[in-house]
Image (cartoon, grey):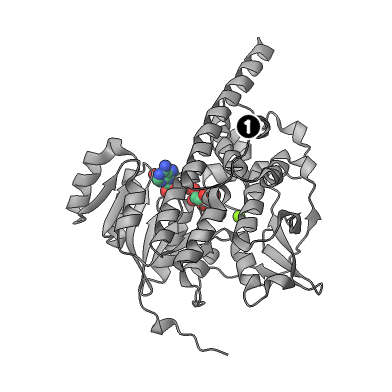
Amino acid sequence: MALNREYHSAVKSLLLQGATGSIGRSTLAVVREKSKRFRIAGIAAGSDLRGLLEIAAEFHVSSVALHDDAQAGELTAAAKQLGIDRVYVGPRALQEQVAAEYYDLLVNAVMGGAGLRTTMSALERGKSVALANKEALVAAGPLLMKTARAHGAAILPVDSEHSALYQCLLGERADSVRRLWLTSSGGPFWGMPWDSLDDVSVERALAHPTWKMGPKITIDSATLFNKGLEVIEAERLFGVDASRIRVLVHRQSVVHSMVEFVDGSFKAQLSVPDMRLPILFALTYPERATSDLVRTEFDRSFSLTFEPLTNELFPCLALAYAALAQGGTAPAALSAADEIAVPAFLRGEISFTAIARVIERVLARWTPRPLVDLETVEDADRMAREMATEEVQRVRSRASMKCC
Ligand code: NDP
Ligand code: MG
């Protein structure tokens, strides 16, 4: 057995974007435990200035970035007080930070399409990326994977299912793999007919049975759209055709995913559900670090259950397979449409089931173009958001006609 080489490792500098969010804070918990191995060189957030400054002070970071330029003056003044002179503000702030700062690994924990350019910029610099931001892979996976290969950089998945698959595939040949099995908790509405979910409240949809996450991914988990994004993410990361990627409902979220091999054997990765574990793996790869953060105890009885999942029950999952089949810019349109539909639901403007209707309408209107470059992806993103906004309006006016 190889000796634990932990104390031989040099300190790794991290650029943590999305530091104030759920994944960002779990990453900080890992760094607190492993403070000798990691240094937070820079951090970034969307608009949570106070959260950003608290983290900056605790971790003595060298640079800060904030998307919201309305708070530019306040950020610059507060950063100066903390002795930080490298400050980036505005819509291009995160990308400029990625392009200019010194770091070994970008941890991309930003929510949504905002994480695309930054991932690409880091890869173009030959920097590896610990990627939680699944939307970037969904929209532009082939471009990102190609850039990573060209620059010798790694994309290390943080998403628990993909971290599990990555770990199960280590040391295996591509032609030994029969199928990838993504597990899903089923979300709060598993077992209920989709048609009965029209009136569910935001609070109920936000009550995830096993994971604590940011609001957008929590709603995506309730519609199973998240699992759809994860199917596309797996197709991109592992180069396995969608017909060989299956989803299975596993309510306990202990088996994080499985690989089925051609000889009929399966490998799975297990732990209690806690994002600090896949984050730790991505940060320390190719080593495994000793850690007490996440312990799975087998000193009491518990059961693991698996149930087949049918796409018809949760249309958002079927829509993701459909977008993959359409190809080109269709997955980018799918993801962008969801980024409009979910906030509309959270604001109370459309019903829970209308999220699927909005995405479906956008895909039905969509003519995919080949994924040539990031501009193609960004054009698709813009156009799909416009279409989705129209569809939200259409759903709202239909709903108001019904009630009056
Ligand atoms: P949160 O909503 O908790 O956090 C999002 C982070 O992104 C915050 O730091 C937020 O800043 C920042 N952000 C949002 N918009 C922008 C923007 N336009 N520019 C710059 N920063 C921005 O999300 P999660 O942590 O739950 O999820 C982050 C990503 O990780 C998502 O892609 C999600 O799908 C993925 N993921 C999450 C998992 C989880 O367990 N949470 C599991 C697997 C994947 P601010 O606080 O200022 O708004
Ligand atoms: Mg996941």
Quarter that holds the C terminus:
top right
Position of 245 relative to 200 (above/below): below
Report the residue marked by disc 1.
362
- Image-quadrant location for residue 173: bottom right
Mark 1: which amino acid?
Answer: Val
Where is residue 192 drawn, in percent x and y? 77, 40
Q: Is residue 300 left or right of residue 53?
A: right
Where is residue 271 drawn, in percent x and y? 63, 67
- Does residue 52 appear in the picture of this structure? no
Q: Which residue is at the far top?
A: 404
Please name the residue shown 70% across and 69% down the image: 268
Q: Does dot 1 land on a helix, a strand or a loop?
A: helix
Please name the residue shown 51% across and 52% down the image: 133
Where is residue 48 drawn, in percent x and y? 36, 43
Q: Is residue 176 left or right of residue 69?
A: right
Please name the residue shown 51% across and 43% down the image: 377
Q: Is residue 151 left or right of residue 73?
A: right
Q: Give the total number of marks visible in the rendering.
A: 1
Where is residue 21 drawn, in percent x and y? 45, 50
Of residue 376 and residue 250, the one placed in the foreground of this image is 376
Quarter containing ligand 2?
bottom right
Of residue 70 and residue 347, the one placed in the foreground of this image is 70
Of residue 246 and residue 146, the one placed in the foreground of this image is 146
- Image-quadrant location for residue 294: bottom right
